[in-house]
Amino acid sequence: MAKKKFYILAELSKEGGRKIDNLVADLRLRGFAGTLPKSIPNHIQITTFPANDAESVTARINKAATENAKFEVEYKNVGIADKTLFLIPSVNSALSRLHDSIALSDELNWFPQTPILTGDQSELIKAALAIIPLLSEMNALSDAGKFKAVVESISIFEFNPAYLIERVKLL
């Protein structure tokens, strides 16, 4: 039996979430299937902790929320891990600072990601190939047209089933 974990998520604003939802809707119109639980907000995964000390993890995110302001991220790439398709945000100083203020100091190989679909890997590869030109087109536009989102809060979730433990707004 897998050990339970707490997932620390940097939640996106409603506007940023709508951009991602619209991208997924566009994929569905193109015939791509896949699922993603709607009970989980659009987010960037920051880190995980063993699910044995909720009080300590809650204290970490509350402290981080007092040290970090809302910030913008830009999406330029896609990736697939296991059976999940995700957008990859460009790591800027604000995202890195948020991660470093929450994660354990010995955490290596952090890979920020925003999951958008789960499903069969061959279908996800086709969907990723469809997204790449869309992201390229958006990011070739003026600054206002780039695929960006604002990170506005931090949350702790436990999954299977999804369960929100704590959510705090950034400054």
Image (spheres, rainbow, N blue to C red):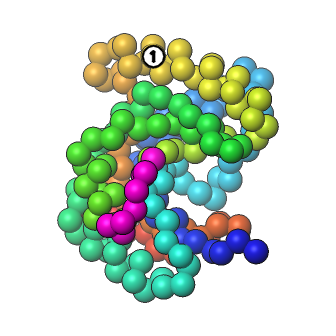
User: Looking at the image, is 123 positioned above or below residue 132?
Assistant: below
Q: Which residues are magenta?
A: 104-111
Q: Is residue 58 left or right of residue 48?
A: left
Report which residue position mark 1 lands on. Answer: 136
Q: Is residue 58 left or right of residue 32?
A: left
Amino acid found under the numbered disc labelled 1:
Ser
Of the pair 134 and 18, the residue shown nearer to us: 134
| Secondary structure of the residue carrying numbered label 1 | helix
Q: Is residue 140 left or right of residue 26?
A: left
Please tell me how crowded label 1 is: few (under 14), some (14-19), or many (20+) other residues with Cα within 10 Å.
Answer: some
Question: Where does the N terminus fall, quadrant-wise?
Answer: bottom right
User: Looking at the image, is 102 positioned above or below residue 23?
Assistant: below
- Give the x, y percent position of residue 117: 66, 40
Secondary structure, magenta segment, majority class = loop
Q: Within the magenta stretch, is there residue 20?
A: no
Picture quadrant where residue 51 is located: bottom right
